[in-house]
């Protein structure tokens, strides 16, 4: 009935079938006189989504999670993953060939300390690691009396027989009506930041920063409209954009050349070498700049100045056009969500629906808007025990039928040219248990606490994170992910530097868009998450002694009333919920057919004790 186009459900190659690749890789290391090699899940620019040509980690190991690292030694091979992926990794890799180790506590360097011997040569690709990551590896090698060796070509590529070609997605111009600021004005702001850094130039190694600065978008990776590219912004003079010319039409090249020179990606290295001569200071982004860039600048006699990319702080607060665009995108998305939620309520009780059915249906409803460019990430649709897997991705093999008594957790988002959405709803299929209602209501109360928060301008996400957890903590419960992440404007659905988490130290500025998504996950039971996107706005408080901010909720979708224990809510919380549902009804109802209007009226009807 429905057909999804932006994501697939096939099971990847895994396990013993890949053992020949590991053997061939070890032979290549021996040929290069290397004792071992480090394979991160990364491309040259530390992107969240990688083009197929950069998926070295899953090709070699079978592990397809979004975060991980492998180290292959002569006799040992280890895959390092965080707690989200321990179960998944165990199913995907060959347990006889690989061991699974923690990614963070302790870090891979600790494992290396127990494995390396004096005289060993550990290889790494300096284009796939940041300088700080390379320094940690080097320190581990030094402690063991071993040597860290930067390779000129990646040995994985040498044995990857049918490696996909690099992507050549066409570059498009992001119209000023959506961007809200010209590239020339953005460049002037960036140059002022470069001057503050005391640098002669800034390397934009993050393609999100390139896309935002020059008001372009691309199609090189899934789910984020990125043109894989670099830029060099000097304190004075014309910037240079380094991008494969095959991605540019005559019109986009002419557009770019109005404000920048355009060169091939291979020209970046010689440009940095030439610029670095004479001790020139060149600013690099700590989070995305490859160690190879620092090495090029240092070898030429220059001074790499590593720090936070100033562009990330410039693009995080959205301007008036971007804010209006995201409001429009969320209203459009809300119509698709209402149609989808009504469809689930009608179809799921039959017991015929599966997780894949819901993913395909939701994408179809979004396609029906006529404006969908992509999903903003692979939809998470988990029912029953699959809902307890925080980053679950349904495959043909794992696909579960939705049964009465289940909870269905569906976390999804869309890319529209005027805005990026991300929303999670938990849906009761049949009659929920008292425990489910209790947990859901605790999560809802935390969600409302964030939505109603008032905080000083410049407060950090870490200062707000506890608000989302307080009611779970009172019952000895918690969730093991951040409460919220930043969101871009027709860019990444996961955008820094703002976030709501115990690690969220960046100041929350007016115009930033953040998710609000507390949850609860009962292992082998069910999962609960409620997510809206929130816009940081200023508020006037009579007698206030400092500027204060609050959140404007952007997402417009009913929260399942059947899962709420009304007696657990305060009067203020109930008032917020009823006001939110009234707003959803007011803004979405006029755009629905009669049957869906009737469903929405019932789903958003006021609640009272």
Image: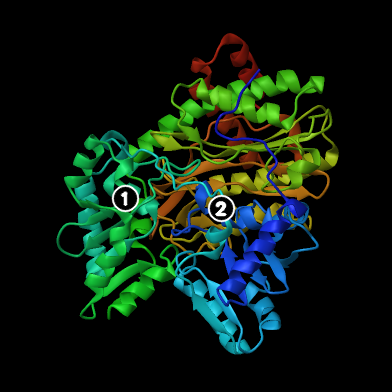
> SS class of the residue under badge 1?
loop
> Which of the 4 quarters of the picture holds residue 67?
bottom right
Q: Earlier in the sequence, mark 2 or mark 1?
A: 2
In front of the other: 80 or 198: 80
Instruction: Looking at this view, name the residue that lies furthest to the front.
Output: 31
Q: Secondary structure at mark 2?
A: loop
Q: Which residue is mark 2?
A: 55
How would you rate the neighbour count of disc 2 (Cα within 10 Å): few for under 14, some for 14-19, many for 20 or more?
A: some
- Is 226 left or right of 454, judged from the image as shown? left
Q: Which residue sits at x=27%, y=60%?
A: 232
The colour scheme of the drawn protein is: rainbow
Say whether residue 233 is visible.
yes
Residue 124 drawn at (x, y percent): 53, 71
Where is 183 relative to 96, above or below?
above
Within 10 Å of disc 1 (Cα), the crowding (few <14, some 14-19, many 20+) is: many
Q: Quadrant of residue 61?
A: bottom right
- Which quarter of the image is occupied by the C terminus? top right
Q: Which mark is residue 227?
A: none
Disc 2 and disc 1: Cα gap in Å? 21 Å
| Quarter of the figure with residue 395 | top right
Q: Are marks 2 and 1 in contact (CB under 8 Å)?
A: no
Q: Nearer the viewer, residue 519 or 195?
A: 195
Give how far across and how far down residue 280 sits, in percent: 23, 76
Residue of label 1:
243
Residue at 50% x, 42% y is 222
Q: Percent position (x, y) of residue 134?
A: 50, 74
Report how many numbered discs are placed on residues in the image: 2
Please tell me whether residue 503 is drawn above or below residue 211 in the rendered image: below
Is residue 608 at all visible to an observer of this figure?
no
């Amino acid at each position: 009935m429905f057909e999804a186009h932006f994501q697939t459900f096939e099971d990847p190659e895994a396990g013993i079938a890949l053992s020949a690749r590991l053997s061939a890789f070890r032979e290549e290391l021996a040929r290069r006189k290397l004792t071992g090699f480090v394979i991160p899940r990364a491309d040259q620019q530390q992107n969240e989504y990688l083009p197929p040509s950069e998926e070295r980690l899953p090709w070699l190991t079978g592990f397809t999670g979004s975060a991980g690292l492998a180290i292959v030694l002569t006799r040992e091979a280890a895959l390092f993953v965080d707690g989200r992926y321990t179960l998944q990794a165990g199913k995907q890799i060959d347990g006889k060939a690989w061991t699974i180790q923690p990614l963070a506590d302790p870090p891979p360097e600790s494992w290396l300390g127990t494995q390396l011997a004096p005289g060993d040569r550990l290889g790494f690709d300096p284009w796939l690691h940041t300088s700080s990551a390379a320094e940690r590896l080097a320190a581990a090698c030094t402690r063991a009396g071993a040597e860290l060796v930067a390779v000129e070509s990646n040995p994985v590529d040498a044995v990857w027989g049918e490696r996909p070609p690099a992507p050549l997605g066409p570059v498009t111009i992001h119209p000023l009506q959506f961007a809200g600021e010209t590239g020339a004005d953005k460049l002037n702001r960036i140059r002022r930041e470069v001057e503050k850094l005391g640098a002669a130039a800034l390397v934009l190694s993050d393609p999100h920063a390139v896309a935002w600065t020059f008001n372009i978008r691309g199609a090189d990776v899934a789910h984020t409209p990125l043109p894989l590219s670099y830029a060099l912004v000097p304190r004075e003079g014309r910037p240079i954009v380094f991008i494969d010319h095959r991605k540019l039409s005559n019109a986009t090249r002419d557009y770019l050349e109005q404000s920048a020179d355009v060169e091939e990606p291979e020209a970046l290295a010689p440009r940095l070498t030439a610029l670095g001569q004479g001790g020139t200071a060149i600013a690099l982004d700590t989070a995305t700049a490859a160690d190879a860039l620092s090495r090029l600048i240092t070898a030429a006699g220059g001074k790499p100045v590593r720090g936070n990319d100033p562009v990330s702080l410039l693009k995080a607060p959205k301007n008036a056009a971007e804010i209006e665009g995201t409001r429009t995108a969320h209203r459009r998305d809300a119509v698709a969500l209402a149609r989808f939620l009504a469809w689930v309520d009608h179809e799921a009780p039959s017991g015929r629906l599966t997780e894949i059915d819901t993913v395909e249906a939701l994408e179809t409803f979004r396609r029906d808007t006529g404006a969908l460019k992509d999903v903003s990430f692979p939809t998470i649709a988990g029912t029953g025990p699959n809902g307890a897997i925080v980053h679950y991705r349904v495959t043909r093999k794992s696909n579960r039928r939705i049964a009465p008594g289940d909870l269905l957790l569906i976390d999804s988002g869309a890319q529209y040219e005027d805005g990026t959405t991300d929303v999670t709803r938990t849906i009761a299929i049949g009659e929920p248990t008292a425990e489910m209602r209790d947990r859901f209501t605790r999560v809802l109360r935390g969600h409302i606490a964030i939505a109603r928060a008032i905080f000083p301008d410049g407060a950090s996400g870490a200062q707000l994170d506890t608000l989302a957890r307080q009611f779970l903590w009172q019952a000895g419960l918690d969730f093991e992910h951040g409460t919220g992440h930043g969101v871009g404007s027709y860019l990444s659905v996961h955008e820094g530097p703002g976030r709501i988490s115990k690690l969220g130290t960046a100041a929350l500025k007016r115009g930033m868009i953040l998710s609000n998504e507390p949850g609860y996950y009962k292992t082998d039971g069910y999962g609960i998450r409620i997510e809206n996107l929130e816009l940081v706005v200023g508020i006037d408080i009579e007698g206030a002694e400092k500027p204060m901010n609050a959140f404007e909720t952007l997402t417009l979708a009913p929260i399942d009333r059947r899962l709420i224990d009304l007696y657990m809510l305060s009067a203020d919380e109930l008032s917020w919920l009823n006001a939110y549902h009234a707003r959803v009804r007011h803004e979405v109802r006029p755009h629905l057919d009669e049957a869906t209007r009737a469903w929405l009226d019932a789903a958003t009807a006021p609640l009272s004790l």
